[in-house]
Image: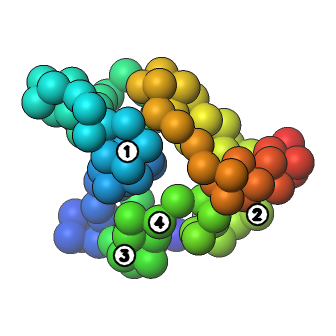
Amino acid sequence: ATWTAASDLDIDHLVPLSNAWKSGAAQWTTPQRQAFANDLTNPQLLAVTDNVNESKSDSGPEDWKPELKSYWCTYAKMWVKVKGVYDLTITSAEKSALTTMLDTC
C-alpha cells in the first residue's frame, strides 16, 4: 500500500506507555520516562497507519496482535527486547501471547 498524506501515519509506542507504567515505569524518574517515551535506539517507536494505532491503542500482545501473522515473530522479538532493555515485567498473559507469536519464527 502507498500513503501520500502524513495524517494517515502515527508514531506508535510498541510497548504502550500505560503498559510500561504498570510493569515498572511508575518507579522511574521523569528523565527515565522521557527517555523511554522518545527512544529512537530500540524498537520502541514505530511509524504505523493511524487505523492500526487506533486498533492497538494501549493493548499488549495478549489483547492485540499484528494483522499479518508473518509479522508476529518480529513484533514479539521487538516487544521482548524493549521490555528487557528497560527491565519491565511481563505478565503471564503477555508471556503466553508472546510465546504463541514467537512460535511463528
As drawn, 101 above or below 66: above
Q: In percent of the image, x 32 and y 46: which residue is there? A: 21
Q: Are marks 1 and 4 in contact (CB under 8 Å)?
A: no
Disc number lying in front (3 or 4): 4
What residue is pinned by disc 1?
20
User: How far is the residue under mark 1 from the one under mark 4?
Assistant: 11 Å
Residue 3 seen: no
Q: Which dot marks residue 69?
A: 2
Residue 93, horizontal then vertical, whole percent: 67, 59
Q: Which dot marks residue 54?
A: 3
User: How far is the residue under mark 3 from the one under mark 4?
Assistant: 10 Å
User: How far is the residue under mark 1 from the one under mark 2?
Assistant: 24 Å
Instruction: Assign a secondary structure to mark 2.
Output: helix
Instruction: Assign a secondary structure to mark 1.
Output: helix
Local packing at callout 3 (Cα closer than 10 Å; few below 14, some 14-19, many 20+) is few
User: How far is the residue under mark 3 from the one under mark 2?
Assistant: 19 Å
The answer to which of 36 and 92 lies nearer the viewer is 92
Instruction: Assign a secondary structure to mark 4.
Output: loop
* Residue type highlighted by circle 2: Lys
User: How far is the residue under mark 4 from the one under mark 2?
Assistant: 17 Å
- Label 1 or label 4, whichever comes before in sequence order: 1
The answer to which of 94 and 68 lies nearer the viewer is 94
As drawn, 6 above or below 20: below
What residue is pinned by disc 4?
59
The answer to which of 67 and 81 lies nearer the viewer is 81
Q: What quarter of the picture does the C terminus occupy?
A: top right
Q: In percent of the image, x 60 and y 49: which residue is there? A: 91
Local packing at callout 1 (Cα closer than 10 Å; few below 14, some 14-19, many 20+) is many
* Residue type highlighted by circle 3: Glu
